Image (cartoon, rainbow, N blue to C red):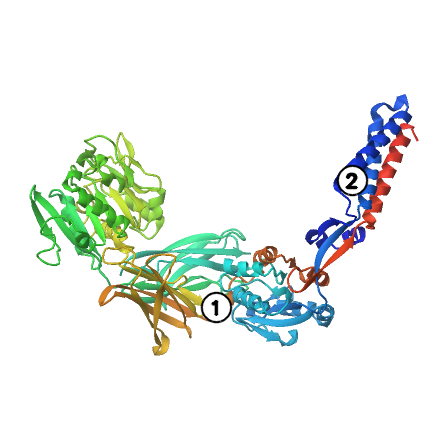
């Protein structure tokens, strides 16, 4: 209908530029229109009968509009638009030939629909105006003779590399447009900004044709799993499993974590509403040290159309290391003794303690050699930075020199270590921390007063954040964990630490009779590290007032101190963006390297030693990133499926700065089982941002006309007259008819 009224298709008006061929100036148009309208107004007003009153104004306006339209036509309006030169431009047709195109929607596979709409008439219509090149997209981009050769057997769909390849070809070929036939099930993580920028720089329109249903009617799919990539042995870990489903709302299934055939954790969940993404947590034990392949799965629900997307794999590196924690306590107390006893039972933690027995005497335990800490609390960076965690008990702020205060701050900010402040009669506000620079490290705003440490009993209760935290996880079941905390014996004492800072997280509250709830355990990220405050020196009663076999006290302190040091980095931190490579071995290795003072090192020699399946090994050099000091990167391709271990080593001359290791997996034949509905959002975004358009298969008869007006390739500028559009004459007729109807209605014809 639009083209019938306006003579040209809509794209001509959206892409064309209106010009006026007469060359006459616009001031002449305005002057002529004003004079003519004035004359018309005079004539209409003179002839108007007294009964017409002010109703002559609409008549005059309609006449002026008609006159203005006629004058506009005299200025010869036209559209100037670029069109592709016939037979001098290439149109690239890219056909998705991955396994997802074999999925059947409403009785026909997506590939069958594709072949039916791209048969000879469609191709011949394009060939009449353009040079047509066919490509098969199945992992890589390959030339194609005919769509009859498509078989939907490709193991992956990587749109970004394919589009970049066509952009590269357009540098030597006049490519006028790209038409992508796909369900949008990209397995490479989407189309990155770099690819989009390259396409736009060539002004190359990408038209997309979407195939397949936009929703899967009966399916449960895991869309993402977040698991820590590394952990200490026998740690509590949490997997956050994101899933969505259709057709099974309210049904029950089991969420589980396995290592091979060994079940690590399992729990029943109720499936969410149709189409709603939901996150379910599940807690499991890391187990012994080593690289582990974990499988997170949702049990198949009867009637599911696709069962292959109910499970995903993740690599976990359980590190055989023993982080060191320095614990400084200001006076002998029960809490000190029981914390030491709790940590002694944890083989993954090394606790070094400094107990001030008199004003000038320190009792050291857990030291590596007799000279360590002989002079007291570390005053040099190389002494303090050998530890991964720091616990400051009931010691006053004045105990530290200004240099030591700055060193403690750098321990969290630069070193990335964890600092835990404990309550006590000589600590926090009662120890003068309110006026100390160390107050900046605390996750709370301390009250500006003394006598905040109170030797009265208080019970404990988890906050909403604490119910989800692994630090406070005494039972794997959430409700049982809440009840276990409520039943703990009361604390021997508590300390008022004021209010939490913005960004801090309160995990546990102390419930004090007559005072209500006070923050007890508060955590916060600080710089590259983390800080926390435990506002009591009385958790020892959790051991003394419970049966000997009860391990609540030990479990809590082990988990709190593991949290304190688990993420403290070494001088070398290495990783890869994705822990699992799906159908593509391209791996990016990144490393952050620091010198002996934990400052970024830009002059190190960094290499990655890779060990893979079937005895595979490789050594890859990492190169500095000029944009960020201390950052290094390299790219490598994992040639076959399986598990890989990577160790990154950094040296400066003959001195080794440090090393780090991580694990990853390559899995083939997996990616096409996920996100099997049509990803229309991706296809529409690609078309919109490149100047193309999204099409349904039934609309392809208009595609050739759309491509004609591309601005890529070899173009010629055309001018299309607008004066003879049917809509112009209809507008003139409408204006005159409206005037006549008004006159007739008012009896002034």
Q: Nearer the viewer, residue 562 or 378?
A: 378
Q: Position of residue 336 (x, y in %)?
A: 15, 46
Mark 2 crowdedness (10 Å alpha carbons): few <14, some 14-19, many ≥20: some
Query: What secondary structure is found at the residue carrying circle 1?
Result: loop
Q: Residue furthest bottom?
A: 614
Q: Nearer the viewer, residue 618 or 539?
A: 618
Q: Which is nearer the N-term, disc 1 or disc 2?
A: 2
Residue at which label 2 appears: 29
**Image quarter (top left, top right, bottom left or bottom right) of the C terminus:** top right
Q: Is residue 687 above or below residue 422?
A: below
Whether residue 265 is visible, yes or no, is yes
The reply, left or right, for residue 371 in relation to residue 207 is: left
The reply, left or right, for residue 496 in relation to residue 125 is: left
Q: Is residue 503 above or below residue 265?
A: above
Q: Is residue 561 above or below residue 700?
A: above
State the residue at coordinates (72%, 61%).
Answer: 705
State the residue at coordinates (82%, 45%).
Answer: 74
Query: What secondary structure is found at the residue carrying circle 2?
Result: helix
Mark 1 crowdedness (10 Å alpha carbons): few <14, some 14-19, many ≥20: some
Q: Position of residue 504 (x, y in %)?
A: 33, 42
Q: Residue furthest top?
A: 50
Quarter residue 263 falls in: bottom left
State the residue at coordinates (26%, 65%).
Answer: 651
Q: Position of residue 748 (x, y in %)?
A: 91, 28
Q: Nearer the viewer, residue 505 or 489?
A: 505
State the residue at coordinates (31%, 45%).
Answer: 524
Residue at which label 1 appears: 670
Whether residue 217 is visible, yes or no, is no
- Mark 1–mark 2 CB contact (< 8 Å): no
The reply, left or right, for residue 647 in relation to residue 699 is: left
């Amino acid at each position: 209908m639009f083209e019938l009224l306006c003579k040209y298709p809509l794209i001509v008006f959206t892409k064309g530029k209106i010009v006026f061929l007469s060359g006459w100036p616009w001031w002449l148009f305005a002057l002529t229109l004003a004079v003519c309208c004035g004359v018309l107004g005079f004539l209409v007003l003179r002839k108007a009968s007294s009964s017409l009153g002010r109703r002559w104004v609409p008549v005059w306006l309609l006449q002026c509009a008609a006159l203005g339209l006629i004058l506009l036509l005299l200025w010869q309006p036209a559209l100037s638009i670029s069109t592709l030169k016939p037979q001098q431009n290439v149109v690239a047709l890219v056909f998705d030939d991955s396994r997802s195109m074999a999925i059947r929607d409403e009785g026909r596979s997506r590939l069958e629909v594709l072949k039916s709409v791209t048969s000879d008439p469609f191709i011949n219509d394009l060939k009449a105006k353009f040079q047509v090149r066919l490509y098969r997209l199945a992992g890589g981009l390959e030339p194609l003779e005919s769509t009859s050769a498509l078989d939907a057997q490709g193991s992956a769909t990587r749109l970004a590399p394919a589009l970049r390849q066509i952009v590269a070809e357009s540098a030597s070929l006049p490519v006028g447009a790209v038409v992508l036939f796909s369900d949008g099930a990209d397995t490479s993580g989407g189309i990155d900004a770099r690819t989009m920028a390259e396409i736009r720089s060539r002004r190359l329109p990408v038209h997309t044709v979407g195939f397949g249903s936009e929703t899967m009617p009966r399916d449960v799919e895991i869309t993402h799993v977040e698991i820590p990539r590394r952990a200490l042995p026998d740690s509590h870990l949490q997997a956050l499993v994101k899933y969505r489903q259709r057709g099974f709302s309210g049904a029950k299934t089991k969420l589980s974590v396995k290592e091979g055939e060994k079940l690590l954790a399992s729990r029943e969940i109720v499936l969410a509403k149709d189409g709603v993404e939901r996150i379910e947590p599940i807690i499991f034990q890391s187990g012994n040290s080593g690289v582990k392949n974990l499988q997170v799965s949702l049990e198949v629900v009867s009637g599911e159309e696709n069962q292959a997307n109910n499970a995903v794999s993740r690599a976990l590196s359980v590190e055989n290391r023993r982080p060191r924690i320095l614990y400084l306590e200001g006076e002998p107390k029960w809490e000190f003794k029981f914390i030491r006893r709790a940590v002694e039972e944890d083989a993954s933690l090394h606790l070094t303690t400094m107990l001030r027995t008199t004003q000038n005497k320190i009792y050291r335990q857990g030291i590596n050699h007799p000279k360590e800490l002989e002079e007291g609390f570390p005053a040099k960076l190389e002494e303090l930075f050998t530890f991964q965690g720091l616990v400051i008990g009931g010691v006053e702020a004045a105990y530290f020199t200004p240099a030591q205060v700055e060193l403690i701050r750098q321990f969290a900010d630069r070193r990335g270590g964890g600092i835990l402040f404990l309550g006590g009669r000589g600590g926090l506000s009662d120890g003068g921390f309110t006026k100390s620079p160390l107050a900046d490290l605390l996750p709370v705003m301390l009250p500006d007063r003394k006598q905040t440490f109170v030797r009265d009993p208080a019970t404990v209760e988890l906050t909403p954040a604490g119910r989800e935290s692994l630090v406070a996880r005494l039972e794997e079941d959430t409700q049982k964990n809440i009840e276990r905390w409520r039943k703990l014996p009361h604390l021997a004492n508590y300390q008022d630490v004021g209010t939490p800072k913005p960004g801090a997280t309160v995990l546990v509250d102390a419930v004090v009779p007559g005072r209500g709830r006070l923050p007890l355990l508060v955590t916060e990220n600080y710089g590259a590290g983390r800080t926390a405050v435990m506002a009591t020196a009385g958790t020892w009663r959790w051991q003394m007032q419970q049966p000997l076999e009860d391990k609540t006290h030990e479990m809590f302190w082990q988990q709190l101190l593991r949290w304190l040091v688990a993420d403290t980095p070494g001088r070398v931190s290495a990783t890869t963006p994705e822990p699992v490579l799906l159908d593509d071995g391209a791996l990016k290795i990144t490393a952050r390297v620091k010198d002996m003072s934990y400052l970024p090192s830009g002059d190190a020699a960094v290499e990655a030693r890779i060990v893979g399946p079937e005895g595979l090994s490789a050594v890859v050099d990492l190169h500095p990133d000029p944009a960020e000091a201390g950052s290094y990167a390299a790219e490598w391709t994992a040639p076959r499926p399986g598990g890989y271990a990577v160790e990154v080593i950094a040296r400066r001359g003959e001195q080794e700065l440090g090393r780090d290791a991580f694990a990853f997996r390559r899995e083939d034949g997996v990616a096409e089982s996920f996100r099997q509905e049509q990803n229309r959002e991706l296809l529409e975004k690609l078309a919109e941002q490149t100047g193309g358009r999204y099409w349904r298969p039934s609309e392809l008869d208009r595609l050739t006309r759309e491509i004609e007006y591309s601005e890529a390739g070899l173009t010629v500028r055309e001018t299309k007259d607008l004066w003879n559009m049917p809509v112009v004459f209809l507008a003139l007729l409408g204006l005159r008819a409206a005037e006549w109807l008004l006159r007739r209605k008012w009896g002034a014809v």
